[in-house]
Image (spheres, grey):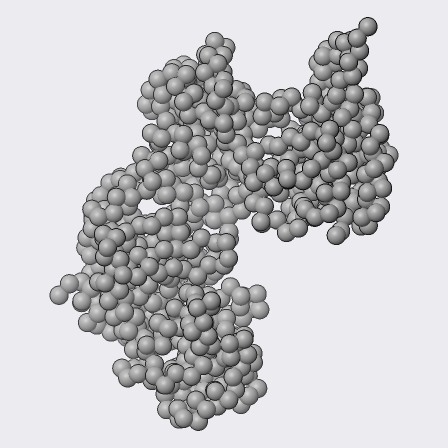
Amino acid sequence: MTILEQCFARPPYSIPAAEREALLLGAFNELTAHHHAHCAPYARIVDGYWGGLRAADSLADLPYLPVSLFKMRRMLSVSDDDIRVTLTSSGTTGQAVSQILVDRESSMLQQKALANSLMHVLGPKRLPMLVIDTDAVFKDPRMMSARGAGVLGQMRFGRDHAFALTPDLRPDIDAVRDFLAKHGDAPFFMFGFTFMVWANLYEQFRDAGLDLSNGVLIHSGGWKKLVEKAVDNQVFRAALKDSFGLIRVHNFYGMVEQIGSIFMEGPDGLLYPPNFSDVIIRNPVTWELAPVGEPGVVQVLSLLPRSYPGHSLLTEDMGVIEAVDAGGDEWMGKGLRILGRVAKAELRGCSDVIAAEAA
Amino acid sequence: MTFTLWNPAPVVLDDTEVLRRVEALTYAGRAPLAKSSLDLLGAISKALFSSPQARVQPQYVALAYWLRPAALERLAGELRTRFDGSFVPAPRGLALHLPPTNVDTIFVYSWAVSVLAGNCNIIRLPSQLDEGTAWLAGLIATTIAEAGEGDRHLFCQMPQDGPLIEAISRHCDLRMIWGGDAKVDSVSRTPIRPDGLSIGFPDRKSLAVICAASYRAADETERDALAARFFNDIYWFNQMGCGSPRMLYWVGESGDLAIDLYDRLDAQVTGKGHLTETGVAIGKFAAVNDLLAEGIGASATRVSNALHVLKSDRPAAMLSQTHGGGLLGQTVVGSIIDIAADVGRKVQTIGHFGFDRGDLEALGQAIAGRGGYRIVPIGQALQFDILWDGVDLFDQMTRRIAIRL
């Protein structure tokens, strides 16, 4: 069995940190060598910045790329003909988007990893699914975006889909009541982006007397807009419990640059990396490994990326490892809390960005 | 349309009133180097020196020094030697200044030279001002008002395009556009007076050159002093000024000298308490990765969080990269003349250390017809010079009325 197969063979979040480090190190070194051999720009980076190809002594010792590099250039470790899908990150207008080049093998591994992660919280059977979004998000090509792709990706893990929102993102109360009448008495699956779950589900339906106590909600997308409303994970969970009786709520952290690697929220509210992944927190001045409990910049590792050199990435998120192997039997490894984005660098020179100046 | 005049408190004026005031300035110019002009600038210097805010910002201290009465008198003396009796010096008239969005202090210098030239001035401040700039503009507007010159120098905010600025531009004899290629292009589409002069300051990049043999011969004190001056050039504007060096050329094999300098530079960073924001550090790391991936950099060293050095065999490409925040390219050449091949139109300042006049003149001749506007000692890269980007600002801001007997 390959290391990845061993990871897949066990409950997806179950490998303790020390065992994980020992198990994954060789496979990550092999991946670094693979990308070094097949991606010339990556090789130039490893040779020019990391002192050349060598086996790392620990996961923290692996070379890492800045995640924004995928916004600056196409990076691939297979032939162009083998690319099946180009994934792009969400980005507001005018921002560069990441381009992630995925071949058949990587795509299959991502699907399998995603399925493992979701089945861990949803159970092995496909459940009826209430999407906290509108179907226009993927039906209307003008709206098609990372959001649409995200919704579509999740929908494959549910059945009998209903959509809680109208195309103009107002509550579709009839659709929700119909869904609950049919499926509300047994476990069902809900998915939505964190901000929309709050603004379009909670804020709009909170007094509608909906019983979602059989639901399992999976949500992602970041807390930035909610921080502005002073809503953190605790407030979020308490509000859903009080208004809808909804208790089974799982946030997850992931990014298109390491798609398939889902950091799932465990019972302690921390985010756990799947078996084939790990997380490292770096001190933002020395860039050395930060100890447990000390905030820093988040670096993520995933064994999945083979078609592009994205197995070890420095993100632009701040985070802290709150606990290790502390989430219970099925939630082992490092328990991560995301603290927000690194404040954007404002390096402005003598040149104006004309569009940036509001008239 | 809203026109807000800093008078010095912000006052909103309607378009008719704005144009009435602008028109009134057409014939309000003064003789160049008038005492009242020198006094006004001297008062600003005094206000800067006496305010605690200015003292913590080295750029403001430099500005205060440049504007102090003795320095202005010396400058005026030099400029008066140009008045050889063959002409009567005259102001151009009304000048419109369009400083960059990140208004550093350059716009104050450009306005100050225009004041010396005797012009009336309209200074359009960006719609969003950072705290320091708002404070500086406020201090200047207050001093102007106290001197009773508020009608002649309009520090204001107004839309960057549209009918109002178009109408104002039509009255202008001189327009100074700061802010790079795109801004020069975009602003230049709006006409000024048919007999007016529009001067644009486009994108520029700068470099530094050190003679390895001279550095080797320099003692500890000289090396530390060089590092202190180099620190100013690199970090004052977070390496994003037109004059900030992006590329360092060593003439002659640098060997262990390079790292010796970088360590001293880093000691300056620590000693002066310069902090690198995490976002800047990550952006710099990304730029280093991109330049290595592209093959523009051959290898990179992280000296510290504040300083990354990228060895490059393609210095011309390295010069055109846009990231700052302490990312220095390095290459070794055999002779100072070898730099000329990398000096294109966009190169502005060449900072130097350890060369004699003959070397520098040879470099100047080698880059003539290519690019490059200033060859100055390391430490003076950001220093304002009345000769800016090859333009003699005072000459351009005045007219000469020829007198032939």
- Viewer-side residue, B152 vs B255: B152
Q: Vertically, is B305 above or below B110? A: below
Answer yes or no: is residue A13 visible.
no
Q: Residue at x 76, y 48 (%)?
A: B3
What residue do we see at 77% from left, 32% from top? B94
The location of residue B44, given as percent across then percent down, is 76, 31
- Residue A21, x across and y down, in percent: 24, 59
A134 sits left or right of A86 in the view: right
The residue lying at 68 percent from left, 26 percent from top is: B65
Q: Give the camera-side residue of A216 and A292.
A: A216
Q: Which corner quadrant of the image does residue B180 belong to?
A: top right
Circle count: 0
Q: Name the quarter where the C terminus of chain B is drawn.
A: top right
Classify B208 as above or below A195.
above
Name the foreground residue: A228 vs B215: A228
Tell which residue pokes out farthest to the front in this image. Answer: B194
**How far across and how far down the image is residue B192, in percent?**
71, 35
Q: Nearer the viewer, residue B361 or A194?
A: B361
Q: Residue at x 64, y 46 (%)?
A: B130
Residue B181 seen in the current view: yes
Q: Is residue B387 left or right of residue A43?
A: right
Vertically, is B70 above or below B114?
A: above
Please provide percent x and percent y for residue B247.
Answer: 43, 29
Q: Residue furthest left?
A: A1
